[in-house]
Amino acid sequence: PKRTLLEGARAVPVPRIPVAGRRLEVLLLPVRGFAVAGGPFERTLSALSRQWSWRPGCLLRVLGVMAAEGAVVLSASDEGIADAALRLREGGLVAFPTETVYGLGANALNTQAVLKVFSTKGRPLTDPLIVHVASKSDALQVVDMEGEGRAVFDVLADKFWPGGLTVVARAQPHIPDTLSAGTGSVGVRVPAHPLALRLIREAGVPVAAPSANRFGHVSPTCAAHVMADLGASPIAVLDGDQAGVVQHTCRHGIESTVVKIDVEERELVLFRRGAISEASLRRALEVAGLSETFRVRVVQKHVPMDQSATPVAAETAVPASVVGQEAPGQLITHYAPDLPTYLATEDPEAETLARQDLEHTVVLDFGGSMVHLKPHTLGYQDLSPGGTCEEAARSLFASLRWTEEVEGADRVVIADVEQLAPQDEAALSLADRIFRAASGRRVRIQVRMA
């Protein structure tokens, strides 16, 4: 039977191989962009071997997998994790699954490895990285939490780790400036995915990791997304989409929440909304009796993307003149598909989209709010037919990537979940991703129904 193998982002059919003679030899040519160790390519071969091995006089002889230069997919086995950990220790890059999105990891203590993360993604040095560790005690080797901020740190770490919360604080002296964009502060978190934790523990080093995609593009929530963006790069990808671990992979669907403990101002500054809601943070401080001591301040920051800052050469250091961002996720254009993207709005001052324009428009709906437009659109998906923001968050990035595959599409229009689900705690985090995917642009759809 036909099977498929990943080739970059595309599925390539594997043709039937006739078993006409007494001997069958199969020469495996490179799969463009990546080679596979213990992944779907290798599993397909094993299945073919089992299928044919019983036939009288038939011998299936694999002459070998010729590894194409590019990414290597590693299975979620003991051997795959050991391989990935070794690569990290030796200064290589490894993409790995977390409960939020896939990260592109490097040894956080190796400046050259960290710089390779920036160059591989095309990420500016002004955009800091988050350090992933395996425990609270390991986190204290990355950030300096002596003093009044320690009580807040303990509350957050004990309540939300392992999990989708990144805490920004003053970096320990041995942490490279490259991680912090020269700000002197660094973000740290303990991921909740079992593969991520095993990888970090086995590597024995803190792992700096932004999302494993090209800079500014839609974040990856499966290994295929990583391959589509970075498959031509010399990285390894730890496959978190296999049975036994897939239920943990990207179950939130959006990145971690980022907060900074500002001791001088006695504030917990919320820089990026994400997997942990603002309401949950406030409740944790209140229960601990710290809500009066440290107030929560939300930063609404939309930094324009500086195209002149990318790509970054691997040997580049952070210039002294560079003013870095205090936290990732501040750019006005982020998580964006390769199509002009807009938020749907009823604002009469917004740009208008007429009925004929829908013929080249892909709509991402929420709770069926725009289902009446479906017959007029080029493509339509509902992020959550039931209207729940957690479900929509899990499907958002995959749906945004799907829009790029709709042939003939000129634009994407996404439902405004903040207006449609104002009582949902997860709405603000989801709305932030949609707002940045659309670069803040809004459009009013003007369609007269018959």
Image: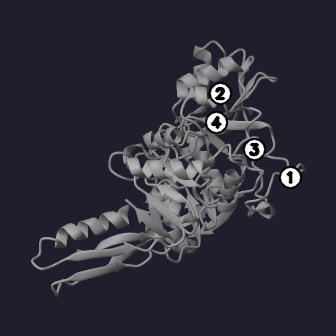
Q: Which of marks 2 and 4 is in front?
A: 2
Quick check: 59 left or right of 261?
A: left
What amino acid is at disc 2? Leu
> Regarding mark 4 in the picture, which secondary structure is present there?
strand
State the colouring used for the structure image: one colour
First in residue order: circle 3 vs circle 1 = 3
Whether 264 is drawn above or below 52: the answer is: above
Q: Name the residue under label 4.
A: 188
Whether 447 is drawn above or below 275: the answer is: below
- 3D distance between C-alphas at marks 2 and 3: 28 Å
* Residue in view at x 46 percent, y 55 percent: 222
Q: Residue 276 or 179: which is nearer the viewer? A: 179
What amino acid is at disc 3? Lys
First in residue order: circle 2 vs circle 1 = 2
Q: Mark 3 points at which residue?
A: 301
Q: Residue 384 or 329: which is nearer the viewer? A: 329
Quick check: 210 left or right of 10?
A: right
How would you rate the neighbour count of disc 2 (Cα within 10 Å): few for under 14, some for 14-19, many for 20 or more? some
Q: Residue 319 carries which label?
A: 1
- 3D distance between C-alphas at marks 2 and 4: 9 Å
First in residue order: circle 1 vs circle 4 = 4
Q: Do the residues labelled 3 and 4 touch (CB within 8 Å)?
A: no
Q: Residue 269 or 207: which is nearer the viewer? A: 207
How would you rate the neighbour count of disc 4 (Cα within 10 Å): few for under 14, some for 14-19, many for 20 or more? many
Q: Where is residue 296 in the image (x, y as percent from the top left)?
A: 70, 26
> Regarding mark 1 in the picture, which secondary structure is present there?
loop
Q: Mark 2 points at which residue?
A: 140
Q: Where on the picture, by quarter, is residue 130?
A: top right
First in residue order: circle 3 vs circle 4 = 4
Q: Where on the picture, by quarter, is residue 171?
A: top right
